Each structure stands twice: as structure tokens, then as C-alpha cells.
Amino acid sequence: MLEISGLETGYGKKQVLFDLSMEVKEGEILALIGPNGAAKSTILKAVCGLIPPWNGEIQFNGTIINGITPAENVARGITFAPQGSRVFNDLTVMENLEIGGFQLPRKEAKKRITEVLEFFPILKERKRQDAGRLSGGEQQMLALARALVPKPKLLMLDEPSLGLSPNLVNTVFKKVSDLNKELGVSILIVEQKVRDVLEICNRAYGLKLGKVVFEGLPTELIKDKNRIKEIFI
Ligand SMILES: Nc1ncnc2c1ncn2[C@@H]1O[C@H](COP(=O)(O)OP(=O)(O)OP(=O)(O)O)[C@@H](O)[C@H]1O
Ligand SMILES: [Mg+2]
């Protein structure tokens, strides 16, 4: 579905991603793990068109999407919930979801929001409430829900567990797993909560200083604790 080959990019003159090749297969949850500064977020930003690739190719369902705008990417079926930025606090749950659907015709957006809310009963109950008054976990659910409004084929999540307490991390990961199974959306998830994300993903890549150092099944990593240490040290 998403095929990246030889991707290199960076900021200003500084290269941070080196000859990266990876793939997300239709229907899977792919986890990208690695320490701070490994360039995990950079990969997602390059895919969704926030920063330009210097070299290499990004293909989505057979079409090269190098350098296309984030809006075009959404129209093609790729959405992105970026690291750290959750929701607009002063807007209601409903208004936050409307922002997720701003590229859709009004009627279509309304229909999609209704469908998405069926999947998030907590948000449905609070749709008129300001997002800033939701708990951290609920805000993360809202960020997920907002990214689902355009009906993506590929949903990219950058550290959805950031700042959440351990039980909320479980709740959010369970939801990610459910929406993959029940809605059939493919997911590319960046995470530092390695053990938790390995529980829900189908495959994983380990990234260190802008290079892939592991590719394989989560079961291989769970068994091989030294491997995880190697990636993170
Ligand atoms: N806007 C930017 N301007 C300049 N350098 C940047 C910028 N964003 C990231 N970098 C640098 O690029 C490298 C990779 O950063 P990136 O954010 O992709 O890492 P990450 O793996 O997502 O880390 P984290 O786990 O901390 O989120 C780092 O060395 C970082 O300092
Ligand atoms: Mg990051």
C-alpha cells in the first residue's frame, strides 16, 4: 500500500534520514520504534507532504506521491495525527471533528462524523463539550476520531500514547487495534511504548539515527530483549 524506497531528507542542510526503505501492507498495523531523534516523526512528515524528500520514492497504491501537499494526501486516503498536538481546546468535540472533515462536501462530512462517533461513544456523549475539558485519554481519542473523518485508507499516528497514564495507554492502543480490525484501515504507528505497541502491531521496524536497524515480527522482538536494547541504546 505504502512503499518507501531510498528515502532521504532532513532540515536545512542537516540530513537526518538515510536511504530508508519500508513498506506498509494493506490492512496491517505497522509499528515504527526507536529512540528520540531516530527520525521517526520525520518519516511521517515526509510521507504526508509536510517536508520534501531529497532522494528516493514514496508510493501509495502504485502512484508516486513525492512532494504532494498534505491536502492532496488526505484526498488520496492518507491522514496523520501528529505528535503532541491533540485537539483544539476552545472548540467543541463536534467542531474538532468538523475540522477533520473540512475537505469533504458538507453533507458527506456530517455523515462521516456520525459514523465515526458510533465508534467513539465517549465522544458522542460529549459532542457539545469543549475539547479542553476532556481528559488526556479522551483528547487522544478525539485526535484519532478527527483523523478518521476523511475515511483514510492509511492512518498515521505519531506517539498517540504521549503523556498518558499506563491504563489510558492501554485504552488508546485497544482502540487503535479495534479500528484496524473493524474499519479495515491500515495503520502506521510511531511509538516509544515499545512493549505495548508490539502487542497490537503485525510488523515492526526499528529505527536508529535515521537508519533501519530491525525489520520483523513483533514476536521476534518480544522474545529478543537484547535486540530492543540495541535499538534503544
Ligand atoms: N524542525 C526541525 N528543524 C531542525 N531539525 C529538526 C526538526 N525536526 C527534527 N529535527 C531533527 O531531526 C532529527 C530527527 O527528528 P525526529 O523528530 O524525526 O525524531 P523522532 O524519532 O521522532 O524523535 P522523538 O522520539 O523525540 O519524537 C533530530 O536530530 C532532530 O533534532
Ligand atoms: Mg517524534
Image (cartoon, rainbow, N blue to C red):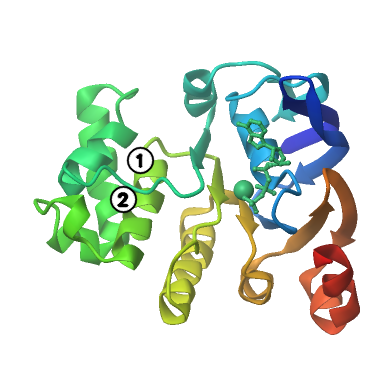
> Alpha carbon of mark 1 to alpha carbon of mark 2: how far?
6 Å
**Sequence-first tag of 1 and 2:** 2
Q: Nearer the viewer, residue 60 or 207?
A: 207
Given residues 152 and 91, the one toward you in this image is 91
In the picture as drawn, the residue positioned furthest to the left comes out as 128
The quarter holding residue 126 reads bottom left
Image coords of residue 216 (percent x, y):
86, 63
Q: Which corner quadrant of the image does residue 61 belong to? A: top right
Amino acid type, callout 1: Val
* Mark 1 and mark 2 residues within 8 Å of each other at the beta carbon: yes
Q: Which mark is residue 125?
A: none
Q: Position of residue 9 (x, y in %)?
A: 78, 26
**Mark linked to residue 116:** 2
Tell me the residue at 50%/37% (across/down): 79
Q: Secondary structure at mark 2?
A: helix
- The type of residue carrying mark 2 is Val
In depth, the one of 119 and 16 nearer the eye is 16
Q: Residue at x 46, y 50 (%)?
A: 84
